[in-house]
Image (tube, rainbow, N blue to C red):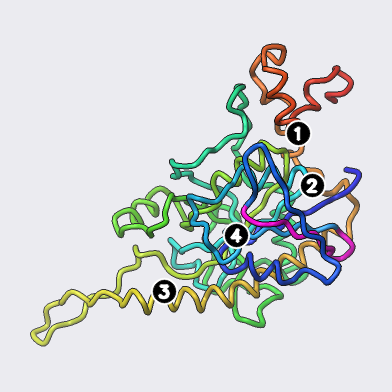
Amino acid sequence: MSQIKIGLIGGTGLGAALVGQGSQDARRHEIDTPFGRPSDAIIETSWHGLPIFILNRHGPGHLLNPSQVPYRANIFALKQLGCTHIIASGAVGSLREEFRPRDLVIPDQIIDKTHKRANTFFERAAVHVEMAEPFCPVLRRILIEAGRDSGTAFGGSAGQPASPAATTSSLDRASFTVHDHGCYVAMEGPAFSTRAESLMHRLWGGDLIGMTAMPETRLAREAEIAYALVALVTDYDCWRARPAAQGQIGHAQPAAEPDPFALLKEITSNLEQATANAIELMRRAVALIASGPPRQLESPAHHALRLAIWSDKSKIPPDEVQRLAPLWVKYFGTADEQR
């Protein structure tokens, strides 16, 4: 790659905080795309000498709920600006004891339960991107490395539960753990799960529940941008019922339901701490990227469309090819140009 450009997508809490991290010489991009305008202006700045493009997913004042986020416009705008990699963030509930509030998780798998959102750029052609590994393994490795002490394992290994005694990362000043795996269940929202749904998600193998990673993850793959997610655990999802209280005659009595306002206050408090942790993790990841040669950042995602366009290219309307030119025009040239 001739130049690495990194998009940072901030979710609940972290979006506004990231925008505030922009330097005084930051540049503001107001962009139009074939899919409308993105959630907010994109702020261009520099971290460790690398161009950084910061996007607040939920917009100014957090007015966009998860189903209203213009995901296609967001990813297309970052592609237009030349982003080669995206590190996104998002608040999640935990479906496992070992993923504790204020922990950070670098997911490796995702289950998509969303159904109201446009989930592809390609509406006038058959384009089938491969999604077996939905998150970029190159970016995931860098984020994991950024969160651990030199030579120390932490937060479990892929496919294995994290040990309660797992070593915390080098960012442990705030007493939290970075987990190196997790299956994210993307739900529609904006309401949280019922307890029955939460228990079902656990049976499916879900570790985290959130509302924004899809279709964002899939769209980034269609745009040939390497994408990884930092999930900020704010609370245990409602599967984790409070234990029954003992009555005076020794029979278990139903426990009182938790005060929903107290729960929301707890989520907000945990999110504030996790946000600070996530920003530090992102900064360390960017420092690692800046310190290595660009070829180490080559990702399978950067060639995702090479065999994914199943339509006869000669039959795809020329105006559609041009409309989506930043995504796929390189595959409509000569054989040499497509290499």
Residue 254 x %, y %:
18, 74
Residue 196: quarter of image: bottom left
Read off the magenta span: 39-50
- The 10 Å Cα crowd at callout 1, few under 14, some 14 to 19, many 20 or more, is some
- The 10 Å Cα crowd at callout 4, few under 14, some 14 to 19, many 20 or more, is many
Residue placed at 59% from the left, 67% from the top?
Answer: 104
> Gap between marks 4 and 2, in whole Å?
19 Å
Q: Is residue 276 above or below residue 10?
A: below
> Gap between marks 2 and 3, in whole Å?
37 Å
- Asked whether, in this view, residue 273 is left or right of residue 321, the answer is left
Quadrant in the picture for the N terminus: top right
> Gap between marks 3 and 1, in whole Å?
42 Å
Name the mark nearer the viewer: 3 or 1: 3
What's the residue type where badge 3 is placed? Answer: Leu
Residue placed at 65% from the left, 57% from the top?
Answer: 40
> Gap between marks 1 and 4, in whole Å?
30 Å
What's the residue type where badge 4 is placed? Answer: Gly
Residue located beneath label 2 in the image? 81
Residue located beneath label 1 in the image? 303
In magenta segment, residue 311: no
Residue located beneath label 4 in the image? 59
Q: What secondary structure is marked by label 4?
A: loop
What's the residue type where badge 1 is placed? Answer: His
Q: What secondary structure is marked by label 2?
A: loop
Name the mark nearer the viewer: 2 or 1: 2
Which is nearer the N-term, disc 4 or disc 2? 4
- The 10 Å Cα crowd at callout 3, few under 14, some 14 to 19, many 20 or more, is few
Which is nearer the N-term, disc 2 or disc 3? 2
In magenta segment, residue 49: yes
Residue located beneath label 3 in the image? 264
Residue 165 x %, y %:
55, 74
